[in-house]
Image (cartoon, grey):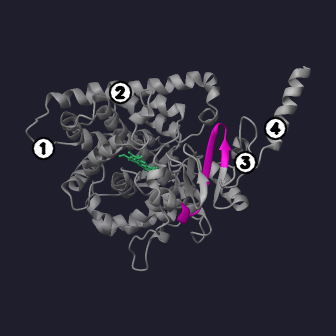
Amino acid sequence: MLVLVTLCVLVLLWWMSRPKNNPGCAPGPRPWPIIGSLHLLDKYKTPFQVFTELSKLYGDVFSIDLGTSRCVVVNNFKLIKEVLIAKGADFGGRPDFIRFHKLFGGDRNNSLALCDWSSLQRTRRSIARTYCSPRFTSLQYDHVNDVGTKEIAVFLRELRKLDLSKPCDLKPLVLAACANMFTQYMCSTSFDYNDRDFKTVVRTFDEIFWEINQGYAVDFLPWLLPVYSRHMKKLSDWASGIRQFILARIIDEHRATLDHGSPPRDFTDALLLHLEEDPNMNWQHIIFELEDFLGGHSAIGNLVMVTLAAIVQHPEVAKRIQAEVDTVTGGKRRPNLFDKAAMPYTEATIWETLRTASSPIVPHVATVDTEIDGFLVDKGTVVFVNNYELNLGQDYWNDPLSFKPERFLSSSGKVVKPAHFIPFSTGKRTCIGQRLVQCYTFIILANLIQHFDIKRAGNLKLQPGCVAVPPDCFQLMLTPRRTTD
Ligand code: HEM
């Protein structure tokens, strides 16, 4: 007992005698032994609110130890640009969380979003660009529209099969529609909404999207791993279930019909052809890239649900979207992507949802010893970009906590976004899927609101600072409107 007490006293004395901050590094709270400053994150519903509070004490760039990880938090737009743009090459890494490895076959570098920067990542991004960032005037954009509008017809048919006199569970249908838009667009195949394996895989992708949006103590305290062993096994099982479905139901058929002499039919063909041309790419890279992009559909499905949650709390927004869609279509047809320019309020509603939901930017990691605003940042330091502050701070917006889509409209009614609004980040690791997000979220939202009056049916389960809603989230009341179809 005496030995234990002496040991504790010695540890405490050592801890108290340590300098508060490493010389040259940004100031920050004094870390506790073992847990660092993890205990501070409990104070608010999202760690980013805590970061904003701490920035008032320590400045716009401050250090914070979270468990075993040395971290730096960057809180204003000028410094965020320094990290993401000016010194993007110094901050191209990602945190080494064990969960990320489990989700990607034991190696997070298999994932496009969770890998460290490398020449392989440059290649993977460039293959994806044509398909996942279609330009307005490109043939790909027309194809995105065709796929989206055809799937909307199926989605509305499925929706009408539900008993709409009762509150309905919309999320599984929205996710199935998004998944089919992605599989059709990227792999030229789609699935019946009642296909058991398809339903399982869509649900699994959604579970993963929710999981990735959560933080766990084990991320920063890896020695807790034995406590999380069942959770980690679940993540590995999810990943292998998805892998089996994609191989059996998508890739096998594609490989059998691949025509080496013709241009790629879709993203899957482009990946398969690239495999033959590029000695640096292997089979695993191809499969993981496809899986990663197909998984993007969950982000869109969740964004649609968060947008609907905002709209049911602001019925005047739904009325304005309905007025816009009725004017543009004359009530005679369904809206499509080429109506987007004439429906600025609908687009502005999506931007306002992204602003208020304020999904975090994936943390970056310093890959070399470097600096932010003159403060030393050691290689391996995790960098959090406080975009919660950019999205909801008083310094950046008037009345930031109110949901007002019109803040994204100019006096002439055009959509305008301030430079500091970067929901998809900026710089070399900016989101590759952002154009698909804007296209498919618009198509689903405009069509849903055209066809239904939507009301809340109970508690809306939402997590602040997050664009994900729980896999089993909330129900909504849908009342069909009078339309021509
Ligand atoms: C609600 C929708 C979405 C939001 C808010 C979002 C936002 C983001 C953000 C903030 C990043 C991190 C950028 C950085 O670290 O600087 C990111 C990365 C990424 N996103 Fe998205 N995203 C969305 C949907 C999608 C979709 C649908 C796809 C695929 C089709 C996609 C593909 C990616 C990829 C591949 C990366 C990693 C890029 C890299 O690290 O090099 N995202 N996204």
Is residue 472 among the parts visible in the rendering?
A: no
Q: Which one is in front, 451 or 10?
A: 10
Q: Nearer the viewer, mark 4 or mark 2?
A: 4
Give the image location of residue 158, x and y in percent: 34, 40
What label does residue 243 carry, if any? Answer: 2
**Which amino acid lies under the numbered mark 1 shown in the image of this protein?**
Pro
Q: Earlier in the sequence, mark 3 or mark 1?
A: 3
**Which amino acid lies under the numbered mark 4 shown in the image of this protein?**
Trp
Residue placed under numbered mark 1 in the picture: 263
What label does residue 43 carry, if any? Answer: 3
**Which amino acid lies under the numbered mark 2 shown in the image of this protein?**
Arg
In the displayed structure, 43 sits above or below 394; it is: above
98 horizontally vs 53: left or right: left
User: Element under label 2?
Assistant: helix
User: Element under label 4?
Assistant: helix
Residue placed under numbered mark 4 in the picture: 14
Q: CA distance from mark 4 to mark 3?
A: 27 Å
Q: Which residues are magenta?
A: 64-79
Residue at figure coordinates x 64%, y 27% from the top left: 223
Establish whether ligand 1 lies closer than 8 Å to the Cβ of label 4.
Answer: no
Is residue 259 among the parts visible in the rendering?
A: yes
Q: Looking at the rendering, which quadrant does residue 18 occupy? A: top right
Outermost right residue = 2
The quarter of the picture where the N terminus appears is: top right
Outermost bottom residue = 411
Q: Nearer the viewer, mark 4 or mark 3?
A: 4
Q: CA distance from mark 1 to mark 2?
A: 26 Å
Give the image location of residue 121, x and y in percent: 35, 43
User: Element under label 3?
Assistant: helix
